[in-house]
Image (spheres, rainbow, N blue to C red):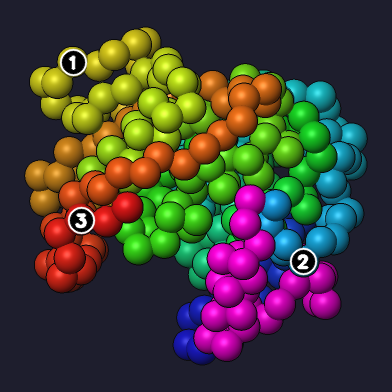
Amino acid sequence: MSKNKLSKFADMATYPHVFEPERGMMPPLSTSKSASMMEEAVSKSGREGMMPQFSFKLKGRWDADFFGNNNPIVLELGCGRGEYTVGLAQRYPDKNFIGIDIKGARMWTGATESLQLGLKNVAFVRTRIEFIENFFAPGEVSELWLTFSDPQMKKPTKRLTSTYFLERYRRFLVDEGLVHVKTDSNFLFTYTNYVMQRNAIVPLVSTTDLYGANQVQGPLPDVARSIQTYYEQQWLDRDIPIKYMCFRLPHSTVLTEPDVEIELDSYRSYARSKRSSLSKAK
């Protein structure tokens, strides 16, 4: 591990608004063997998700024991550098925001900025999204942001808009809680649309070109455009349109996965040209 990363981890260990599960709660973060074992457990566990179970010390107590108020709690899942977490916290002081990611070195950027700005309505948790329900009690979260998630074109159960994850979100998200999806990936956006259609969920807002001339269906929140992440700017510089969707997630329906093939994205990242030799995937 580089000295720069070690320095960032050391910084965050002193930040009062950054939380990492205590040692022993979760499998090791760094070994490929443990990651493979976890993925195997996910694939075998089905919808119930036989993930390691524990109760984080602030579960059900975020309002009283950390934020000190009853304001709505909003999560950014896969927050990366935390630009949305910090940007939303600045714009909405009457809400509390928590960024979730496993990449601590990236999270350091937003954690440091929010500390320097003196924001009291921000926190960060370093964990895998698979373990998310261990950190929040039923009905404790009012809203989710999924910003530029990995589309996981080969692994449906790892897509953050799959029914596998939607069912996990329902364990702590209020009934009809908002879910925002912002992505460069046409694959993920198309897949999410199929999930919506298969489960009779009608998006409140949907657009395939957030900054372009394409018509936006529904009332577009200002923060969908006014906050741009580091990765978002990369896609815009490459003339890749940004997609956005917002929907309410009900508790009452039984969620089922769509059985469709979707054309793969033709690129992977800023430095690579293509994600896969295949042309389609389910």
Q: Give, as a three-letter code, the residue at label 3.
A: Lys
Q: Which residue is mark 1?
A: 215
Label 2: how many Cα within 10 Å (few below 14, some 14–19, many 20+) = few
Circle 3 sits in a helix, a strand or a loop, which is it?
strand
Q: Which residue is mark 2?
A: 52
How far across and down, in percent of the image, does residue 122 sit?
65, 42
Q: As rendered, which of 88 and 247 lies closer to the eye? A: 247
- Label 3 vs 2, first from the N-terminus: 2
What x and y, as percent, mark residue 132? 68, 52
Which residue has dot 3 on it?
280
Residue at point 56%, 58% (across, down): 101
For the residues labelled 3 and 2, say whether their Cβ atoms are less than 8 Å apart: no
Magenta range is 21-47
Q: Is residue 247 left or right of residue 55?
A: left
| Element assignment for label 1 | loop
Residue shown at 38%/59% (left/top)?
A: 152
Of residue 164 and residue 1, the one placed in the foreground of this image is 164
Which quarter of the picture shows residue 25?
bottom right
Q: Nearer the viewer, mark 3 or mark 1?
A: 3
Distance Cα–Cα, label 1 vs label 2: 44 Å
Type of residue at label 2? Pro
- Amino acid marked by disc 1: Gln
From this view, report whether residue 259 is shown above or below residue 243.
Answer: below
